[in-house]
Amino acid sequence: MNQIIDSLQQFWQFTGFANCQWQNLVMILIGIAFITVAIVKDWEPLLLVPIGFGMIIGNIPMFPGLNIGIYEDGSVMNILYQGVKQGWYPPLIFLGIGAMTDFSALISQPRLMVIGAAAQLGIFGAYLLALSLGFAPNEAGAIGIIGGADGPTAIFLSSKLAPDLMGAIAVSAYSYMALVPVIQRPIMLALTSRKERLIEMPKPRQVSQKEKIIFPIAGFIITAFIVPSGLPLLGMLFFGNLLKESGVTRRLAETARGPMVDVVTTLIGVTVGASTQADKFLTGKSILIFGLGLLSFVIATFSGVVFVKFLNLFLKEGHKINPLIGNAGVSAVPDAARVSEVAGREANPRNHLLMQAMAPNVAGVIGSAVAAGILLGFLG
């Protein structure tokens, strides 16, 4: 009888119930909230469902030493997490992004590239704010990249500069990517007048196939020479686009933008979510990171819209830019451009801004990778 009781007591010690702390339950509830929002609101479900379920996985209480946790060397979860920790996954995501991105809007309207550059002020604004709050320069740089609204770039840079903060930075970046319509729209409407929202822009010109092929080659050479430290992201982004536009590597392009990017996105989501173990995630630094991430996103949106308004002071009638596309300078493709389209249609049902907004939107993808390269070059 005593042996049976001892066996039951030993079994109990290995259960999650015996090892559970309230912090684990909080993180599990947050994971469930992510999944619920993704399903009910349809906010970035391909990101939030894996991250939310990963949070649940990472916060199941366990007896120490079982070698199954994400931070235990040699465990299955730890091996999968190396793609995040060592920065392998983000370049593969950028390969897929390049293979599914049409740069025609940017090629036909190169002047709109500067809007994507202006929106990167959110990154450097958050960097300065993080420094003022006592974060180390490398940590501040990793936090600032959240303002680019680019999850893979945030993971890549934080893996190099602040691996201990990667979970909070990645979850913050992906969360705000999902909240693009909620965060950006009120800022855009507050900064623009009805007259400005009614501005109609001409349709982009047709871009030749030759231009589409030359762009990724020339774009990579120029940006890589300026910021060599951004090569892993920039190289894969432009290479993926060349696969798409060359016309002779269709199978590779379809694989890159389809099965490959789906697998890598799933692995990133689950492992990033699982890395948010309560003892490592529920800290004062994590709360500050979420706050700074929101501020950086607000600064980026503000900078893009205000910069367009500034440009319009020097542009003649008929050539002015609708300030509603200023929000699209962040890297959330194509969600930010859709916000521009919806806001423009509300002011003028005949006004279609999607194609114009896609120019700064794809410029923002390039801009966030360049900004990451700059920060890595200075702080790495």
Image (tube, rainbow, N blue to C red):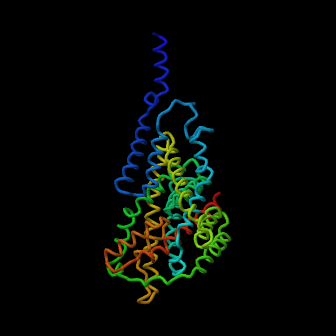
In which quadrant will I find the C terminus?
Answer: bottom right
Q: Nearer the viewer, residue 354 or 363?
A: 354
Q: Residue at x 34, y 75 (%)?
A: 345
Q: Residue at x 61, y 43 (%)?
A: 79
Q: Is residue 331 above or below residue 106?
A: above
Q: Is residue 208 above or below residue 148?
A: below
Please count the marks in the image.
0
Residue 131 visible somewhere in the drawing: no
Q: Is residue 137 left or right of residue 329?
A: right
Q: Quadrant of residue 22?
A: top left
Image spot of residue 211 (x, y percent): 59, 80
Image spot of residue 291 (x, y percent): 44, 55
Q: Nearer the viewer, residue 313 or 82?
A: 82
Image spot of residue 232 (x, y percent): 64, 61
Q: Nearer the viewer, residue 99 or 21?
A: 99
Q: Residue at x 37, y 62 (%)?
A: 182
Q: Quadrant of residue 24?
A: top left
Residue 245 visible somewhere in the drawing: yes
Which residue is most to the top?
A: 1
Q: Is residue 172 left or right of residue 213?
A: left
Image spot of residue 372 (x, y percent): 59, 62
Q: Is residue 9 left or right of residue 345?
A: right
In which quadrant will I find the N terminus?
Answer: top left
